[in-house]
């Protein structure tokens, strides 16, 4: 086991303990309030945006917007060059996520914090799972940033420290689920 494996074990234990201590209702509420709520909404848009954009009706709508602006004048050409249809799409997706997030979080918090022993246990278990999921997303995001900056050179940088990991952290570093999202976002427009 490499040092990164021990760090991963400590991270899992600490985040699960903290999540169980705080509980799902309070944890979800605190993770989605204020600036954190905006960051969560942006992250959700980042993760789900490419998938939603690949749905046929969304893709057709974006193609219609592009077709309606093609060959009009220089200003429309500039807007097409910056992919204004994608900008509009992500702004609308962000607004939708924000509008859905607030009532869903409030409802879940109210249900899971009912003063009942069964709900208390469920709240604690889901709190541990929530904090573990957030920690996993943060680790993947950090891995992606390091990958963009350092790449994957054997024996060097973060990748070198992850090589030989029992938990296959080096494989997660190389095949990060977040790594292909930016490519998929505009893949339907690249010719």
Image: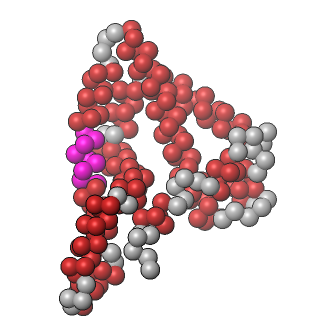
Tell me residue 185's x, y (percent). 42, 64
- The residue lying at 71 percent from left, 59 percent from top is 157
Q: Is residue 21 above or below residue 177?
A: above
Total marks in image: 0
The image position of residue 138, as x and y in percent, is: 52, 46
Whether residue 87 appears in this view of the structure is no
Magenta-highlighted stretch: main secondary structure? helix
Task: Please tell me whether residue 77 is drawn above or below residue 61 in the rendered image.
Answer: below
Q: What residue is shown at x 52% (from left), y 61% (from top)? A: 180
16 or 45, which is in the foreground? Answer: 45
Query: Residue 32's quadrant in the figure?
Result: top left
In the picture, which quadrant includes the N terminus?
Answer: top right
Viewport quadrant of the C terminus: bottom left
Q: Is residue 30 magenta?
A: no
Residue at (40%, 21%) from the top-left corner? 123
Asked whether 100 falls inside the magenta stretch, the response is yes
Question: Which residue range is magenta in the image?
Answer: 94-102
| Direction front: furthest residue | 56
Query: How has the structure been colored for display?
Result: secondary structure
Residue placed most toward the observer, 64 or 35: 64
Q: Is residue 103 visible?
A: yes
The percent coordinates of residue 61 (x first, y second) are 25, 66
On the image, the x and y values in percent for residue 112 come to: 33, 21
Q: Name the residue at 39% across, 11% down.
A: 118
């Amino acid at each position: 086991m490499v040092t990164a494996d021990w760090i991963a074990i400590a991270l899992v234990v600490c985040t699960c303990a903290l999540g169980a201590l705080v509980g799902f209702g309070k944890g979800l509420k605190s993770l989605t309030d204020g600036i954190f709520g905006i960051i969560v909404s942006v992250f959700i848009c980042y993760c789900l945006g490419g998938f939603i954009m690949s749905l046929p009706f969304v893709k057709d709508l974006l193609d219609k917007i592009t077709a309606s602006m093609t060959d009009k004048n220089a200003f429309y050409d500039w807007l097409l060059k910056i992919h204004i249809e994608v900008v509009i799409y992500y702004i609308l997706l962000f607004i939708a996520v924000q509008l859905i997030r607030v009532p869903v979080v409030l409802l879940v918090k109210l249900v899971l914090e009912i003063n009942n022993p069964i709900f208390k246990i469920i709240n604690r278990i889901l709190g541990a799972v929530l904090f573990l999921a957030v920690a996993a997303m943060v680790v993947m995001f950090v891995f992606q940033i390091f990958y963009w900056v350092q790449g994957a050179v054997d024996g060097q940088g973060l990748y070198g420290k992850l090589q030989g990991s029992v938990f296959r952290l080096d494989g997660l570093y190389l095949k990060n689920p977040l790594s292909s999202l930016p490519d998929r976002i505009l893949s339907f427009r690249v010719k």
